[in-house]
Amino acid sequence: MAEHRITTERREVLLAEYSAANAVYLTYDGFRWQSGTFLVAGVFVYWGFLITSSGHALLVDSAAILISALMSCWLFFAHHYRQLYMFKIERLQEIEELLGMEQNRRMRPRGPQEIFYKATWPKGHNIDIAVYIFTTLGSVWLGVVRHGFSWPEFLVVLGVVAVVVVVFCNEHRLRVQINDTRKLLIALDAPNTEGSR
């Protein structure tokens, strides 16, 4: 984006929007783990019950299906919140560009002479997926150990694969949409850049 002349009034509006977007981003980022923690704790309680009891196969299979359904909802919820906070970060970076700020812009490579903070793997959304796989397939594994492999466990495994594929496809669409938006902003800004030369 080109350097823009911004009125004091517009600057105040952008700073207020920046503050609100930053607060919402932090809320979205933390809330998925706050909610997920309760679900994961419940899974461990169930595992403890399963290990110490002689539960019937129907009970074990039903619980594995329930855990899979609940954790699938959590993963979709976490990914939905990821989309929202990624859009918030994009807007934060746009405002930083307009106002000459740096905090979030340093997370995106901009040029050879620019400071760039590169996050390393694993990233938060990959950890979400790992927790999902561990909790759902862990429940299947405990069921298999208790009474052998049966069709409900097979359904859970298929469900896990389907959910992970959907999340990865959504992640790809999210990245495409963000990149398209960046290209649009550059195209919209081009007349301003040419006019200032």
Image (cartoon, rainbow, N blue to C red):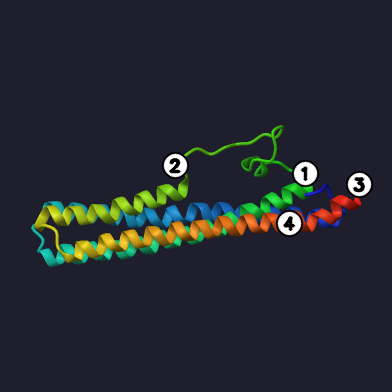
Callout 2: 10 Å neighbours few (<14), some, many (20+)? few
Q: Spatial distance from mark 1 to mark 3, Cα to Cα?
A: 19 Å
Residue on which the image places disc 4 = 185
Whether tag 2 and tag 1 are in contact, CB under 8 A, the answer is: no
Q: Looking at the picture, tell me which residue is in the foreground, 28 or 154.
A: 154
Q: Spatial distance from mark 4 to mark 2, Cα to Cα?
A: 30 Å
Res 100 seen here:
yes
Residue on which the image places disc 2 = 122
Q: Dividing the picture into quarters, in which one does residue 40 lie?
A: bottom left
Amino acid type of the residue tagged 3 in the rendering: Arg
N-terminal of the pair, mark 1 or mark 4, is 1
Residue on which the image places disc 3 = 197
Whether tag 4 and tag 2 are in contact, CB under 8 A, the answer is: no
N-terminal of the pair, mark 2 or mark 1, is 1
Q: Is residue 126 left or right of residue 6?
A: left
Q: Which mark is residue 100?
A: 1
Give the residue at x 11% y 57%. 148
Is residue 57 shown above or below 90? below
Q: Looking at the picture, tell me which residue is in the foreground, 138 or 193.
A: 193
Amino acid type of the residue tagged 1 in the rendering: Gly
